[in-house]
Image: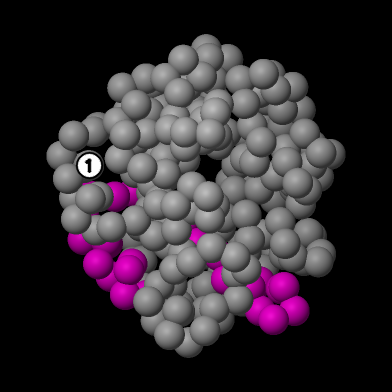
Amino acid sequence: MKIEIAAFNYESAIIADQNGADRIEYCANWKDGGTTPDVEEVKTLLEKINTPLTIMIRPRGGDFQYSEQEFNDMKESIENFKDLPVLGFVFGILTSDQEIDSERNQELIKTAGDKICVMHRAFDKTPNMNLALESVIECGFHTILTSGHAKNVEEGLENLKKLQDLSQNRIQIMPGGGLRSSNLNRIKSAVNCEFFHSSGIVDESGIANADEIKRLKAH
């Protein structure tokens, strides 16, 4: 079992790196649920850490239906990051009907080249979990970050089991959303996933907590 830490700022990424995170999802704007970080900041961070890094590609908070300009901004962001030694990108685009926007997602995956691409929790907003799973797999994503089509991983536990079964190893399922050291054992015992995702944040600071990351890793 491995732990991915969502780091919403430079300090959190350093804390995650120093306390055993297996991977870091790097983004900005914690209150918005994560947006695309600054390229120069990522360059500086990469000189300081050894933990593999994925980059959030999301032009704003809110919904996951994007204008043509926002979509072009997402492509440009991937182009700006992809020559850096990052592992991959985290994004998700939905149609006006909240379905997976296969055409646009595939275009971003193509832009990413050989980097891995993770479908983030936009997946949990889709109306039909099973159909969305198949669409995400067909797009070519490497991983789905999901709370099991629910508000958090505890409420979505049964769906996480279903997703793991339905995926048949065609895509990685990564539980995330309300995941803490206090409930990790319950989630882990129910779903056999390689990665589990948490911010490691325990207060309103928006900064990852070193002890919480250690507790997550101890499981």
In the rendered structure, the answer to whether residue 83 lies left or right of residue 10 reads: left
Q: Is residue 96 magenta?
A: yes
Q: How is the image coloured?
A: one colour
Q: Position of residue 13 (x, y in %)?
A: 34, 35
Q: What residue is at 74 percent from the left and 22 percent from the top? A: 186
Element under disc 1: helix
Q: What residue is at 62 percent from the left and 26 percent from the top? A: 180
What is the quadrant of residue 122 in the picture? bottom right
- The residue under label 1 is 45
Q: Nearer the viewer, residue 10 or 126?
A: 10
Q: Which residues are magenta?
A: 75-100
In the rendered structure, the answer to whether residue 191 lies left or right of residue 15 reads: right
Q: Position of residue 44 (x, y in %)?
A: 17, 45
Above or below — where is 129 with respect to 174?
A: below
Q: Nearer the viewer, residue 102 or 204?
A: 204
Q: What residue is at 58 percent from the left and 15 percent from the top? A: 219
At label 1, the amino acid type is Leu
Above or below — where is 31 with respect to 189?
A: below
Q: Is residue 71 magenta?
A: no
**Quadrant in which the N terminus is drawn:** top right
Q: Position of residue 216 (x, y in %)?
A: 54, 20
